[in-house]
Image (cartoon, rainbow, N blue to C red):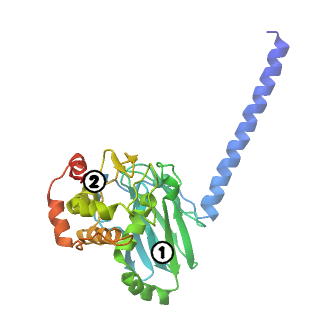
């Protein structure tokens, strides 16, 4: 290569280098600007946890809203495919919130629409965010990390209401069907709000559970909720081989409530008896392996 063409190349190299240097500088300025004016900050590590210890964890054992002081709240949320627990969060206007987030399985996102709250939720790590809700309204909450086949249904809601309504709302919430609320928060992302499921992916509950129950499935259903389910099942000629996660983190009462909901919402088994918390506690004490749950399934 002669000297002149070498010079020409070197000239272009210098131009590209300075262009990328200028770009980097612009990006740094943007970050500095948003740190200074938009309240952005870089996420810090806030402690660790492991998915199997969540039930006994002080913050995540009973996720949800905890008042800390007037106008100050702690909100703990556990993400798992494909739901946030809890999926509905109610807060009064002006609430200053410390969010503590973790995942039970894979990486999820926690993004509150119309705010700068947007953080990754990692299994084993606790993410922390502080946010003040100055405006009343509904804030859509969604997962923005692809986490599996029903990722697009991983949604939640933050409802910010005037302080006067806030105290009243607690009572109406308590009146709404508890089982239905638990179902909508945890199960509907896969099994759908109407219980129809998704053919080939998530088994239907409507039109399926009543006959399963009458075929001797009462105990089986408790174990499915407590320990999850793996292995092929066939319903109306369609094979499903998804993985139902265990829902042990729900209390005995919550599991009884949600079972009573799914067994009465879309038809009721002929011999239906309501589930009670005490029998869920008994079933919980039996060490049943997830593969054994599959064997308990009544053949129809
Ligand atoms: Cu969780 Cu996408």
How many residues crowd around disc 2 within 10 Å: few (fewer than 14), some, or many (20 or more)?
few
164 vs 177, nearest the viewer: 177
Residue 161: x and y, percent? 52, 82
| Disc 1 secondary structure class | strand
Q: Residues within 10 Å of mark 1 (few under 14, many from 20)?
A: many
Q: CA distance from mark 1 to mark 2?
A: 53 Å
On screen, 21 above or below 252?
A: above
When asked about the image quadrant of residue 9, the answer is: top right
Q: Is residue 110 left or right of residue 293?
A: right
Which residue was labeled with disc 2?
A: 300
Residue 126, percent from left and from top: 38, 56
Q: Position of residue 235 (x, y in %)?
A: 37, 52
Which labelled disc corresponds to residue 175? none
Residue sitting at x 22%, y 73%: 273
Residue 65 found in image quarter: bottom left
- The answer to whether residue 173 is left or right of residue 142 is left
Residue sitting nearer the eye, 117 or 68: 117
> With respect to residue 176, does 28 lie above or below?
above
Q: Position of residue 164 (x, y in %)?
A: 48, 90
Q: Nearer the viewer, mark 1 or mark 2?
A: 2
Which residue occupies the foreground of this view, 19 or 113?
Answer: 113
Q: Secondary structure at mark 2?
A: loop
């Amino acid at each position: 290569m002669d000297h002149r063409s070498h010079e020409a190349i070197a000239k272009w190299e210098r131009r590209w280098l300075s262009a990328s240097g200028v770009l980097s500088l612009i990006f740094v300025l943007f970050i500095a600007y948003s740190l200074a004016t938009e309240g952005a900050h870089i996420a810090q590590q806030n402690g660790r946890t492991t998915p199997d210890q969540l039930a006994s964890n002080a913050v995540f054992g009973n996720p949800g809203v905890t008042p800390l002081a007037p106008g100050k709240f702690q909100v703990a949320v556990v993400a798992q495919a494909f739901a946030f627990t809890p999926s509905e969060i109610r807060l009064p206007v002006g609430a200053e919130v410390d969010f503590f987030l973790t995942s039970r399985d894979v990486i999820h996102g926690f993004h509150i629409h119309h705010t700068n709250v947007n953080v990754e939720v990692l299994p084993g790590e606790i993410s922390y965010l502080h946010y003040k809700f100055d405006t009343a309204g509904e804030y859509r909450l969604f997962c923005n990390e692809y986490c599996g086949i029903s990722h697009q249904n991983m949604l939640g809601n933050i409802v910010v209401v005037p302080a006067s309504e806030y105290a009243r709302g607690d009572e109406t919430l308590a009146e709404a069907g508890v089982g239905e609320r638990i179902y909508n928060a945890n199960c509907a992302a896969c099994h759908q709000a109407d219980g129809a499921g998704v053919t080939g992916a998530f088994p239907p509950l409507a039109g399926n559970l009543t006959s399963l129950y009458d075929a001797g499935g009462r105990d089986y259903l408790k174990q499915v909720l407590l320990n999850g389910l793996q292995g092929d099942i066939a319903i109306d000629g369609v094979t499903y081989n998804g993985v139902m996660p265990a829902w042990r983190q729900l209390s005995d009462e919550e599991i009884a409530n949600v079972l009573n909901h799914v067994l009465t919402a879309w038809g009721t088994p002929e011999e239906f008896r309501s589930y009670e918390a005490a029998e869920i506690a008994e079933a919980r004490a039996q060490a049943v392996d997830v593969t054994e749950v599959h064997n308990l399934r009544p053949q129809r």
